[in-house]
Image (tube, coloured by chain):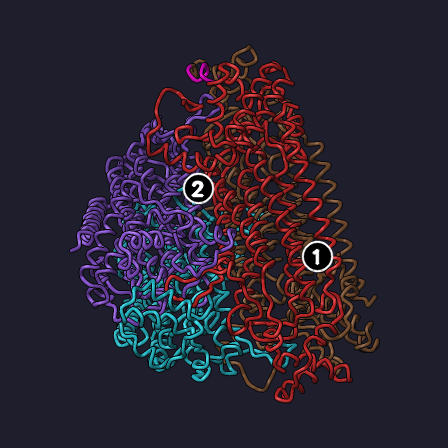
Chain colours: A brown, B red, C cyan, D purple
Amino acid sequence: MAKLWDKGYRLDKTVEDYTVGNDFLLDAALIPYDVYGSIAHARMLAKIGVLTKKEAARLTKELSGILRLHEKGKFVIKKEDEDVHTAIENHLVGKLGSTGKKIHTARSRNDQVLVDLRLYTKDKLLELMGAVAGLAGVLADFAEKHKDVPLVGRTHTQKAMPSSLGLWAGAYAESLVDDLTILAAAYGLNDQNPLGSAAAYGSALPIDRAYTAKLLGFRKVQGNVLYCANSRGKTEAAVLAACTQVMLDLSRLASDVIFMSIPETAYVSLPDELASGSSLMPQKKNPCALELARGNAAVVFGYLTQAYGITSGLISGYNRDVQLTKEPLMRGLETTKKTVDVITLTVGKLRVNREKCLDAFTPDVFATDEALRLVAQGAAFRDAYRTVSKNLAKLKAEDPVKNIKSKKHAGATGNLGLRRLKEDVSSDRKTLARMKKDFHKRLETLVKGK
Amino acid sequence: MAKLWDKGYRLDKTVEDYTVGNDFLLDAALIPYDVYGSIAHARMLAKIGVLTKKEAARLTKELSGILRLHEKGKFVIKKEDEDVHTAIENHLVGKLGSTGKKIHTARSRNDQVLVDLRLYTKDKLLELMGAVAGLAGVLADFAEKHKDVPLVGRTHTQKAMPSSLGLWAGAYAESLVDDLTILAAAYGLNDQNPLGSAAAYGSALPIDRAYTAKLLGFRKVQGNVLYCANSRGKTEAAVLAACTQVMLDLSRLASDVIFMSIPETAYVSLPDELASGSSLMPQKKNPCALELARGNAAVVFGYLTQAYGITSGLISGYNRDVQLTKEPLMRGLETTKKTVDVITLTVGKLRVNREKCLDAFTPDVFATDEALRLVAQGAAFRDAYRTVSKNLAKLKAEDPVKNIKSKKHAGATGNLGLRRLKEDVSSDRKTLARMKKDFHKRLETLVKGK
Amino acid sequence: MAKLWDKGYRLDKTVEDYTVGNDFLLDAALIPYDVYGSIAHARMLAKIGVLTKKEAARLTKELSGILRLHEKGKFVIKKEDEDVHTAIENHLVGKLGSTGKKIHTARSRNDQVLVDLRLYTKDKLLELMGAVAGLAGVLADFAEKHKDVPLVGRTHTQKAMPSSLGLWAGAYAESLVDDLTILAAAYGLNDQNPLGSAAAYGSALPIDRAYTAKLLGFRKVQGNVLYCANSRGKTEAAVLAACTQVMLDLSRLASDVIFMSIPETAYVSLPDELASGSSLMPQKKNPCALELARGNAAVVFGYLTQAYGITSGLISGYNRDVQLTKEPLMRGLETTKKTVDVITLTVGKLRVNREKCLDAFTPDVFATDEALRLVAQGAAFRDAYRTVSKNLAKLKAEDPVKNIKSKKHAGATGNLGLRRLKEDVSSDRKTLARMKKDFHKRLETLVKGK
Amino acid sequence: MAKLWDKGYRLDKTVEDYTVGNDFLLDAALIPYDVYGSIAHARMLAKIGVLTKKEAARLTKELSGILRLHEKGKFVIKKEDEDVHTAIENHLVGKLGSTGKKIHTARSRNDQVLVDLRLYTKDKLLELMGAVAGLAGVLADFAEKHKDVPLVGRTHTQKAMPSSLGLWAGAYAESLVDDLTILAAAYGLNDQNPLGSAAAYGSALPIDRAYTAKLLGFRKVQGNVLYCANSRGKTEAAVLAACTQVMLDLSRLASDVIFMSIPETAYVSLPDELASGSSLMPQKKNPCALELARGNAAVVFGYLTQAYGITSGLISGYNRDVQLTKEPLMRGLETTKKTVDVITLTVGKLRVNREKCLDAFTPDVFATDEALRLVAQGAAFRDAYRTVSKNLAKLKAEDPVKNIKSKKHAGATGNLGLRRLKEDVSSDRKTLARMKKDFHKRLETLVKGK
């Protein structure tokens, strides 16, 4: 089929391949969102009298049909289509003739792909945020269950002071709850309607951007049309930066579990179904998923590097470079979501070896507590520190369980604040579930032509 | 003076130099914050009975004295001090003897530097956010003033459609307002009290973390003590990611002004006092500050890369690696702030050459508008597009001013939404000014021992 | 088919998907190299008596068969195969029974994938280096052809001094010749035989690693077996860093052509077949491939960021994280090669508008030359500079062609050193062509069982 | 003093601060190199008759004087000087009047800073390469000394197969020898004379660039003058990419030593003088320098990110953005060198606990060797693997020393190839020492006016 900008000459094959890139593959994921955006656009054009109601209805019907074809895997974007927008316009023209030729009135592929990506990102962020809240919940449950399992707390990888599995899991639960606030900021940035910005300079027609925003469930119109164009790449960078916050947490959690499951520590172990073997070494059980989670943090950060580097320093208006931010956005969101899922599974199935945790408590782990005991008896801390420091060999092992329970200040092993944490997680999960439901309901209603 | 952990042996000189790094220099900026944190800590220790009220008062007085010495440049951290914490503890011990030795009770340098950096970052973020809001205001004013100056809008660097200087400046104003939401999320992450987490495992003493949070003006206690330790590097990454959003905008704004001030366009020009000369070429007036703003986007992103890379994959608890996130945090915040300032100055002084802007309007810039005119006359858009495409030579120049005024939909050249934008900016500025004032007042009150 | 490490339990589906990742897709590109490595390994096992000659011959034959199946697209790696190594071993076992079960003697998938990637990378680097040398040649030819076409040289994007299209193209030609030395260093790092390092700790059998090195055409054995394992990720980073050098050049070349083809300059233009249109704006001809080349520099750098970040800080020995360096390596090499190709095409077809180049020569471009004229007449340079600076309005236009021809020192417009440059390029091309031929001949010979 | 481009107006203070940046501080390190470049330039100007011999001699003498002032810390670059070039030219004009005003004939600060940085980088790279070769030697010695100390080899952090401390240290020694080839490529790129390229477009005077190349000890003239300008940033990226190769190795070595010195392994320990204490926990001995080495890998990579990001996509010719590549270059070289030094010290002083190394050899570590024993008895490998896999509990501990000695193939524990490795290291060290000596001798000769 013809390119939308067909002018009677053919692009050089090398150039065509290079410019299309992976778009014809990546855009498969955008088909539903391009349909939603196109339906909203058609209805808006009818509202302002550029299309008749009948034309809009025919377009809506045909676009809904594309959705069904896509669900069956029968709407395929070919390389020569260039992208999802062309494939869909060509399909409409093929089916509806002149009416199909009207769909692109007052829009450009520039704002069309913007709206597609915004809807896609919204959908994926809602899933991701739900999964992050879910993992926070799993970690909070783990913390509750194992709050009295002592763990040797480390600094510099060396043994430091008494800790607990509850403290360990609670730390990540709280961290993920905080990540949700960063994700929410990126979500808010993304949740703006760019449709109608066209090529970056709007349109001579009196289009109604508030109406398409409402139809598509955006919280607001993204105003200035040049800003709409300029925000491609910027939004991607914000979303990927929020993903890297999550990956940072998960990479450290993975490192912890890898470390806590070597034979020398063996505080925890992975069940067989979570560990891979070696092709050469018969005895191996490897924490592969955790290592990949750790490595994937760098992968997602690399995607952020791409999105940022592509966009930085470009002059205003659409520049083709930004097409290349599509893949890192999609891959980054996908990798983050999958990593959250695999870690959720792992934490849920982690086996705790309480005895091994207890065995690790050598007397030196209690050195600091001993110094503070001297402080309680009246010594100045720095003197107490030096006294203990000179008498390390005399330190005695204590009961670690008693020790961790005795620390009662906010956030300490004996006062993890899990009730409040669980309430926060539960509240976040409810809010996110509602947002997701509302969003999908909006889109369903739109497809039904209402 | 002695190291806090002195055990009677000397560190190898090479190792000492390597581990101290730049800390003794960078920490100069942390002196006030270390004083604030220490005063709050001392008062809390008195509240729970570990110090007497008199001891706390003496410590507060001596710490306030450090603040005054610092203001006069007379409190210097030496390399052999290792860091600000040691310099201050040693000073207190020197002045107050045994009472000085008590200040480090129930804390570690790990939570001490955390609290210092949180207060520092809060202060700098408030300044930065104020400056960003200020620049948004300057841009909105520029947009208002030049909303009827037509500009050739570009895509792919090629001429595309009618735009305006108002649209151009408004785009950045809106973008910066959005950046404030990302900055605010990072601000919220940072605005939590880590004091009391000690080495990462809290303390055996019944410390009151809510009290220090209140004294220092934090919005909440950062609960789980291990999370406090783990959040070093993470917070830095979130703050630097927010800074990169701002830099992304400014790098593009800088590229635009560089492009719009070459002799071939000359839409705008820099006054002499903003342009540097060449040592070799007598005629040159170079937009150096803008080029550096563009380049500094990559610099700040590099700092984010450092903060992220240092932290990713570390096991839980304090690891010395994270000391290295201090410099990228400080430099990143500083570079972003300076870039905002230099761009604010530039936009404020930018000279507009209306004639040059008008001269650039060749007929092809109106091609899309012509196609939509055919649509208004009943043609299907794709047909109209092809008609115009085949008759480009027949296109006529239009009145660009009339054209840009005629586009009235939301966010278009004739409807920039500047009133609403200015209200948003104004509201943000007020909120930020109040937050800054409250924060500084809190710290002043603290130093006065109230 | 079974996993190589099958132990009678099934991996959890989520974990399996996460650990397999894209390997089953990416590994399609490794099939030939896995075959080559396996043939060499089988022949070595026969040489040391672990396999009979007959067994080795049967394995070689069956492996060659896989190569033919692959060429017809009939050897497919399924997700449940995990990777190319499993798919091939399972195929051999299916065809040859017990003999197939012997192929994995004294090797691990760890060294197997290393050898696959080394051969793959060698092949791709030879192609890439050939293409880079080819582009240097095209640029040198362009420089020769247009050496007398004056161009306004710029600094700070502003007009600076007389330059020429010859100088412009020659600059990139020389730069690419230098890039070849960086690529060659990465090539040398990669060109070492890791086979026999097994899981990272070698083998109890007296394997002959020099023999497999010879069979596979490696310049040397990569000695220390632990270093072999540790070099995964490191080699990838070196190769990608070399690719980024090329991309850095091409991103700038692309920026130049984009700038030189806007209507305001129009020094050059792209023929229709290299420029894309707009879906909305009928008049547009966009330099999309160049914009994507510019953006792809950030993409390739992002791949380097991934390879580096994944590997940095890992403990010695194989860690599963490094599996994730496969995709950035492959994609980075592919993107760089495609970008070289598209730029080669573009430079070859670039149209030069000599008149436009000449028109741009306003008098100020000659200011520096005027100052040096005063120097030649006896003035001190700094005085001459100030004299010209104060009399800019009196500057006169000169003949730019005469000007550029008159500058005769090494590397100046009148002495581009193109003969020497072309000789260098030609010599590089010959060497690279010979290396490529030798490498492929070696592999063909191997497959034929010689 | 006046700016070189003084035109009678003052730069805005904010702009001046922003454009000068850290240059006036960083440039202190460039003073000697600016002197060398200036002497060579003056002598060349005399050779072509632009200066008299006497003028050149006076300039040389005065420039040598700056060198002596600098050595005493008495040549200080002030902020208002902008940079080293201005400070030196102003000094020369102050001392020599009209003769001083001639030094800038036929050069620009653009090529001046290029030549400064090339000489600086050459000096620092020679030091760094010498240090890297030195560390390789220390590691080879360590490997020799401990070649029979068994170590449990790991994959996935889990126990895998018998290894040795010799294999461990040898792996890094070989890796660093390979790094030298990457450093050498970057060295070669840098070792080209850019002087005479002036602002990027050469000079109207018949300057002799080969002569300055010879005087300054460059291996060749960097030809094309525009390429000289364009190579700023590019060279920096190549040098920093080579540094990251070294840092990648050191980050992993550091992780290994951290892991091998926790109480659970305790294979090695750091002497007191290499470990820091804690301010809170009396018992702690922390491997801080190693953690910082690990973190500094990310720091150096961040500098590469800056250099790359700043430069990518710029149009040809000098752009002020590239000034910002100076700091990452300098800091990256410095950090890498310091890290090499601290690791060299650490490896040299590392204490080995042979008993702990032996204790770690549980029977499972020999599983693979057992499987290959079954192969030697006639079993197919995959069958042997499964047999061992099902009978893990029956595995017996072996003598690890005998085991590691028995593995005799190239690169295995019993055949580390240390003699050859040491020869390579020794040869590299000699070559590098000679290069360093020659370079310094060249510069001394130059200063003496010969």
Pick out the residue farthest to the left.
Answer: D450
The local secondary structure at tag 1 comes to loop
Asked if residue A331 shows in the view, the reply is no
Instruction: Using the image, determine if residue A235 lies above or below residue B73.
Output: below
Q: Which of B143 and A183 is in front in this view?
A: B143
Vertically, is B191 above or below C443?
Answer: above
In the picture, which quadrant includes the C terminus of chain C? bottom left
Subunit that carries the residue with mark 1: A
Could you classify mark 1 by the number of other residues whose Cα lies within 10 Å: few (under 14), some (14-19), or many (20 or more)?
many
Q: From the viewer's side, name the closer residue of A19 and B403.
A: B403
Q: Does the magenta stretch include residue C147?
A: no
In this rendering, does residue D419 appear at all? yes
Question: What amino acid type should be assigned to the residue bearing mark 2?
Answer: Gly
Answer whether labels 2 and 1 touch (C-beta < 8 Å).
Answer: no
Q: Are marks 2 and 1 on the same chain?
A: no
Q: Which amino acid does label 1 sit on?
A: Asp
Give residue B237's position: percent from left, percent from top.
55, 45
Relative to C366, is B97 above or below? Answer: above
Residue segment shown in magenta: A385-390
Residue C288 on image: x %, y %: 53, 73
**Pointer 2 local density, CA inside 10 Å: few below 14, some 14–19, many at least 20:** many
Q: In this view, does D252 lie to the left or right of B48?
A: left
Query: Residue B121: x and y, percent?
Result: 57, 40
Secondary structure that dominates the magenta span? helix
Rounded to the nearest angstrom, the CA distance separating label 2 from label 1 is: 37 Å
Above or below, comparing residue B396 to residue A119 in the picture: below
Q: Mark 2 lies on which chain?
A: D
**Which residue corresponds to mark 1?**
A191
**Disc 2 designates what residue?**
D295
> Is residue A389 shown in magenta?
yes
